Image (cartoon, rainbow, N blue to C red):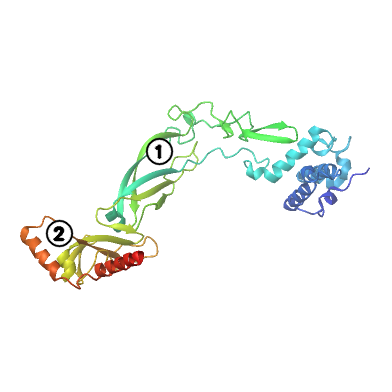
């Protein structure tokens, strides 16, 4: 049976460029892949036909020969001395090779880079680092400049990050030919794993630097100045680009992430951009009214007027006395919550005066009167 034209097999015109050929190949390979067509006995042969066509047309030299001589270019005695890609004789090894081609072209980007693209990146990016920083509420309010010491890896000065001694250049790993991966055939599948000889770098160093032992980096504690912006709160993350761990063998440096924790404050409690402050007031001040001074987070003072007859739990707002917003500007508020304090350690005279006051108090405790009236009604209902 005569072979079909390779361009016809892929469904493209003869003038199709490399991108069009690859796109058409992917579509056809997925269409006829045996795993997707278990009930179609012709799928395997068509799948092999598609791979044979693409294996020829993706190679510029083979494509030129095919465009000139057709299939005769690769027949015995022809231009190529054999069928492209080693042929597809129908055996398991040939099918596995075809599957490997599809695996590379369709999934190569997920398995370590483009097919046939040479060694993977010889330099690996350094790891990102985390530093937990505790700040006071005052520092979170005003912002601060903090100096931290971070143990990390930095580029080796002796070899300038290459990992090789005396200015020597790393050599291509003979085990993986610089790919950083080795493959093993298991039936229909091709299994890839990191090359054990070079650790996936694609290169080996025969004469490693004595200071960094070939890693291109050494351990060192660095001192860094960190700007803490006003308005940070617990959970805020600050990224310092390029201040993380140095890359392996001259690779790019990772980043440093500062995670903020704001310490509890003895006076203020924070809720977003708002602050809460519980202020005790005397029973007399709560009953008669008066003025009190309360602290503010900026270190100042604010005078607050207490209305006569104030009860515990009453709140008053001081606008603009809270925390600054980290993003978008603006300022939160401060809420004062009153806690009426019952006097203790009374003298005999004080007790006498309070007892006299209690005798004279008739309509001075409306909440108590209302509560006990409800209690009386409850008991009456229970006995009726």
Label 1: state its secondary structure. strand
- Quarter of the image for residue 86 reads top right
Q: x and y percent of residue 55 in the render?
A: 78, 42
Residue, disc 1:
152
Q: Residue reaching furthest right?
A: 1
Q: Position of residue 360 (x, y in %)?
A: 13, 71
Q: Is residue 195 visible?
A: yes
Residue 373 location (% of width, % of height): 28, 69
Callout 2: SS: loop
Q: Nearer the viewer, residue 142 or 354?
A: 354
Front-lying residue, 313 or 332: 313
- In the rendered structure, the answer to whether residue 187 lies left or right of residue 198 reads right
Horizontally, residue 280 falls left or right of residue 224, namely left
Which residue in the protein does label 2 denote?
A: 343
The image shows residue 338, relative to residue 168, as above or below, that is below
Quadrant (top left, top right, bottom left, bottom right) of the N terminus? top right
In the depicted view, which residue is nearer to us: 53 or 314? Answer: 314
Instruction: Indicate whether 269 appears above or below 71.
Output: below
Residue 219 in the figure: left or right of residue 69: left
Q: Residues within 10 Å of mark 2 (few under 14, many from 20)?
A: few
Asked whether the beta carbons under mark 1 and mark 2 sit within 8 Å of each other, the answer is no
| Circle nearer the N terminus (1, 2) | 1
Residue 283, picture quadrant: bottom left
Marks 1 and 2 sit apart, C-alpha to C-alpha, by: 58 Å
Q: Is residue 130 above or below residue 182?
A: below
């Amino acid at each position: 049976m005569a072979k079909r034209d390779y361009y016809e097999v892929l469904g493209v015109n003869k003038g199709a460029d490399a991108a069009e050929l690859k796109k058409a190949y992917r579509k056809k390979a997925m269409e006829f892949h045996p795993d997707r067509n278990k009930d179609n006995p012709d799928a395997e042969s068509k799948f092999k036909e598609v791979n044979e066509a693409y294996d020829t047309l993706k190679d510029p030299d083979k494509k030129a020969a095919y465009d000139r001589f057709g299939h005769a270019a690769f027949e015995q005695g022809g231009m190529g001395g054999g069928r492209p890609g080693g042929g597809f004789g129908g055996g398991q090894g040939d099918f596995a090779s075809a599957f490997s081609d599809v695996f590379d072209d369709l999934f190569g980007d997920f398995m370590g880079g483009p097919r046939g693209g040479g060694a993977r990146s010889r330099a690996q990016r350094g790891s990102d680092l985390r530093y937990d920083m505790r700040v006071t509420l005052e520092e979170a309010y005003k912002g601060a400049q903090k100096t931290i010491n971070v143990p990390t890896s930095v580029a080796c000065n002796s070899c300038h990050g290459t990992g090789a001694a005396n200015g020597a250049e790393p050599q291509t790993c003979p085990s993986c030919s610089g790919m950083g991966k080795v493959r093993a055939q298991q039936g229909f599948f091709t299994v890839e794993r990191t090359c054990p000889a070079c650790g996936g770098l694609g290169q080996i160093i025969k004469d490693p630097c004595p200071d960094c032992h070939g890693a291109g980096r050494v351990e060192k504690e660095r001192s860094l100045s960190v700007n803490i912006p006003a308005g940070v709160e617990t959970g805020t993350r600050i990224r310092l680009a390029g201040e993380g761990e140095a890359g392996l063998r001259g690779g790019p440096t990772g980043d440093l992430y500062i995670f903020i924790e704001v310490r509890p404050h003895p006076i203020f409690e924070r809720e977003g951009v708002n602050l809460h402050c519980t202020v005790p007031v005397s029973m007399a001040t709560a009953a008669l009214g008066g003025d009190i001074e309360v602290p503010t987070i900026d270190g100042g003072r604010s005078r607050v007027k207490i209305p006569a007859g104030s009860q515990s739990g009453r709140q008053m707002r001081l606008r603009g006395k809270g925390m600054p917003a980290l993003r978008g500007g603006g300022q939160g508020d401060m809420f004062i919550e009153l806690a009426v304090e019952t006097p203790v350690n009374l003298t005999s005279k004080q007790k006498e005066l309070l007892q006299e006051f209690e005798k004279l108090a008739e309509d001075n405790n409306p909440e108590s009167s209302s509560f006990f009236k409800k209690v009386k009604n409850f008991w009456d209902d229970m006995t009726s």
